[in-house]
Amino acid sequence: MNGRRDGALTRRQFLKAGVAATAAAGLGGAARLGPKAYGYGRTSKKMIILGIDGLDPVLTRRWIDEGRLPSFRRLLEAGGDFRPLGTSLPPQSPVAWSNFISGMDPGGHGIFDFFSRDPKTYVPVFSATETAGAAKTIRLGKTIIPLSGGTVRNLRRGPAFWQLLEASGHPSTVFKMPSNYPPVDSKQRTLSGMNTPDLKGSYGMFSYFTNDSATVTQEAGGGGRVYDVFVAGNRVEAELPGPTNTFRTDAPEATVPFQVFIDPSNAAAKIVIQGHEFVLKEREWSRWVHVHFDLIPTQSVHGICLFYLKEVRPKFKLYVSPVHMDPARPPLPISTPESYSKELERRFGPYFTKGLPADTSALENHVLDEEEFLAQDAMVYDESMAMLEYELGRFDEGLLFFYFSNADQRQHMFWRLTDPGHPAYDAKLAARYGDVIARTYAELDRALDAALRKADKDTVVLVMSDHGFNAFRRGFNLNTWLLQQGYHRLKRPWKQLESAYFDNTDWSKTRAYGMGLNGLFINERGREGEGVVASGAEKDGLLREIAGKLEAVIDPKTGEHPVLRAFIAKEAYRGRNLEMAPDIVLGFNRGYRISWQSPLGGFPKEILEDNTQKWSGDHMSAPEVLPGVAFSNRKFTAEAPALYDLTASVLEVFGVEKPGEMIGRNVLAKD
């Protein structure tokens, strides 16, 4: 997650979507069909796809040549092939993986950014899901009784490729596919990935209990909270926050009390919560801890979390991870059939269910240090590898897709330590962690080794990523630029730096605004709540004027163009689902990205600023800057395949005709 905010009240507005997700959780979620028996016939056609988020073609090629990725080299030496893979516009993960899932670009599948906006209110909302509480309720005193279930809806359009395979009788297992929350209806085994919320309905909200001075910068849709605690007689009393209790008219936050008993002699403590007792040494992680939040006497929601005892003295510091949905009892749908998430839980115990599980926000806010963050992400990797081996062990037909998040998350946070020119470069940390990214690629090489060991002559193996990576050295404040260019007006200009969520915008005089990580919208009359620009010639002329000026911006510090290309959406996309599309999509130059404040309506003083944060690598550039990778044990027939071409290629492997709305083509040679 990228956009950062400070104002608690307006942040709650943004989290409206998350609260709605929680409401659905409290109401038991959308009704789901029970599992049905498969009726597939066996087929000799098989395909294993490793989806590795953020695997960069330049780095991968370099480390193959240096002998650090022996499985990738083995694949190529055995007659396999490699191509840089055309990514999406913009190359954001939810957009890119939707391209692959649907075989379309955003004009077809309708996902344009992490965030979208309500055009009538200008309030940002999550782009991938829509959630709602019960349609009918009754109120008894301070209690709200739902008469129907809540709903959560995946907004991506078009059939997923595994739905098409299912219709043709080819079984699939799709493990943690991003942009598949909630999982689309299917009898195939699927487990949702990126965009799956925590129990609070957010992208991940950690809790930090301490008697030390600490603050946390809130992020849009996630982040963390600091709770001041007192150590009295070597004892700490605290409450773990949970979901909003939508059964109560005042909608309080549900909590679970817990106690910490600090060992008076040793650097250790015992934690007691809901009947669980466990002892942690200083700098030790707990196993998964089950918790349940009671909403009313007959309704509870179940979650799991990790405790990390960072320090007991002289200061007390206890980190608790975001509360993940319990895969054995998820309050919202996370798998198809429902039994799949439970099956994995029975075999492996509790596991990470929240999308993008590594807590980048805790590292950014110095709640976890580099070593602690890597320890947490190593748990994610080890868990993924164990589950990959399990799925490979029983794979004998159809398709297996398996996703890894580690490369993406670690490149975001450790790029600064590979780049002496980065504003956040730290030579001392670089000496210790400068090879984290290379070591991560080597770890993922072992996943390919497992896949190659399983593959026989009839198995197509494909390794793909959604985008590459580059440095995020400088941030571009789009809304500040629009303000200085006269396209945006503030009601109280002297309060520019305090503006947030466009709460200071004079919409009657505003012609354009930036929203999301790559998007610019025209304040169009009849579309926006207070639009002033007429559609047609007036809007088209304004679009070309702004796009031209954006591409002409020069960074006085570097002499480079921060915006490499400003794409006019209706010319860049194919498909009929453009109603939520930005009017202009910014394609940044290498080293640049949207700033931290601009995506959700902030107006910092300067147009360009150094990025001094640990989140130092990114992928918001023009697509040609950041291709992903495609490796296969088959030859590619195209020099420059794209994500949606792989979708058509998957269908071709199984002899399934692609739907007319798919824009990709088969790019894999036949045997």
Image (cartoon, rainbow, N blue to C red):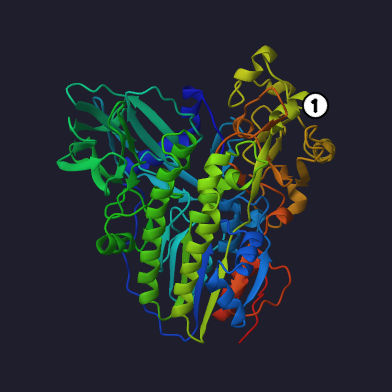
Find residue 583 and report its image quarter: top right
Total number of numbered labels?
1
* Residue ID at (32%, 44%): 148
In terms of image quadrants, where is residue 538? top right
Q: In front: 548, or 508?
A: 548
Residue 494 placement, left or right of 233: right
| Horizontal side, residue 423 vs residue 248: left or right | right
Q: Residue at x 68, y 12 (%)?
A: 494
Q: Indicate the quadrant containing the C terminus: top left, top right, bottom left or bottom right.
A: bottom right
Closer to us: 429 or 315: 429
Query: In the image, residue 77 lies at what x, y percent?
Result: 61, 80
Residue of label 1: 485
Mark 1 Cα-neighbour bin, 10 Å: few <14, some 14–19, many ≥20 = few
| Any part of residue 588 in sight | yes
Residue at x 58% of width, y 45% of height: 417
Occupied quadrant, residue 513 = top right
Expressed as whole percent of the image width and height from the top left, the position of residue 338 reads 33, 60
- Report the front residue among 495 and 209: 209
Residue 345 x/y as whole percent: 28, 59
Q: What's the residue type where badge 1 is placed?
A: Gln
- Of helix, strand and loop, which one carries label 1? loop
Compared with residue 332, is residue 269 higher up or lower down, i.e. above or below? above
Can you give x and y, in whole percent of width and height, for residue 17 in the image? 46, 38
Quick check: 558 left or right of 318?
Answer: right
Farthest-out residue, left: 275
Is residue 615 visible in the rendered image? The answer is no
